[in-house]
Image: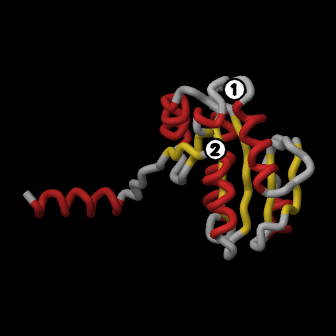
């Protein structure tokens, strides 16, 4: 039996099987992760799993992670109450990295959860602005950009590396 299990694990690794993990995240956990990891730059991007372009967005995130994950920590944070939406997108797109969902404890009201999450991150990072869709931080946690850009841009990624 032990031999069969080891054989199965070996076969899965040969075929490139990786399990994507969905992680629920609070602003406090996110900022703690950023502060504890000073060897890599960080990108934070909010997204909505049930928007019309969600499949395209997750495919783009997968490409970015594949290309830059050695130098950057990506926090693609979905705003949803339905983990199954995220799981379905992961299956459709072949996403192979961690993907995050804003913890409902941040705000039970899904319509303002992102704003509440972003405001708390800004507060914890001592920023004057209290809202953003995308944020880029260098290795030292210095903010390079935060604002309403709805796309993670490669030229900005190269600036934070």
Q: Quadrant of the N terminus?
A: bottom left
Choose between 25 and 58: the one closer to the eye: 25
Q: Position of residue 158 (x, y in %)?
A: 81, 67
Report the residue marked by disc 2.
59
Q: Could you say whether the residue bearing mark 2 is in a helix, strand or loop?
A: helix
What number is the disc on residue 51? Answer: 1
Residue 155 seen in the current view: no
Judge the density around disc 2: few (<14), some (14-19), many (≥20) Cα neighbours within 10 Å.
some
Q: Residue at x 73, y 51 (%)?
A: 44
Nearer to us of marks 2 and 1 is 1
Please say whether residue 43 is visible from this viewpoint.
yes
State the residue at coordinates (13%, 58%): 4
- The number of discs equals 2
Residue 17 at x, y percent in the picture = 39, 54
Mark 2 vs 1: CB contact within 8 A: no
Q: x, y percentage for residue 137?
A: 79, 63
Task: Find residue 114 and report its horizontal and vertical position in percent.
Answer: 73, 35
- Per the rendering, the mark at residue 27 is none
Q: Residue 101 versus residue 49: which sits nearer the camera?
A: 101
- The image's colouring method is secondary structure
Residue under the point 57% across and 47% down: 99
Write down the quadrant of residue 119 in the picture. Answer: top right
Q: Nearer the viewer, residue 11 or 87?
A: 87
Q: Considering the numbered disc 1 on the image, is that residue within a helix, a strand or a loop? A: loop
Snapshot quadrant of residue 31: bottom right
The quarter of the picture where the C terminus appears is bottom right
Q: Earlier in the sequence, mark 2 or mark 1?
A: 1
């Amino acid at each position: 039996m032990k031999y069969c299990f080891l054989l199965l694990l070996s076969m899965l690794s040969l075929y490139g099987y990786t399990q994507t993990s969905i992680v629920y995240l609070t602003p406090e956990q996110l900022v703690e992760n950023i502060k504890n990891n000073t060897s890599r730059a960080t990108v934070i991007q909010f997204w909505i799993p049930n928007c019309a372009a969600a499949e395209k967005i997750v495919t783009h995130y997968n490409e970015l992670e594949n290309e830059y994950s050695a130098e950057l920590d990506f926090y693609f944070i979905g705003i949803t109450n339905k983990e199954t939406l995220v799981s379905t997108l992961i299956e459709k797109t072949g996403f192979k990295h961690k993907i995050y969902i804003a913890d409902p404890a941040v705000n039970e009201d899904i319509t303002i959860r992102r704003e509440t999450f972003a405001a708390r991150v800004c507060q914890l990072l001592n920023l004057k602005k209290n809202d953003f869709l995308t944020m880029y931080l260098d290795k030292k946690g210095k903010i390079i950009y935060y604002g309403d850009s709805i796309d993670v841009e490669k030229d900005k990624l190269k600036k934070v590396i």
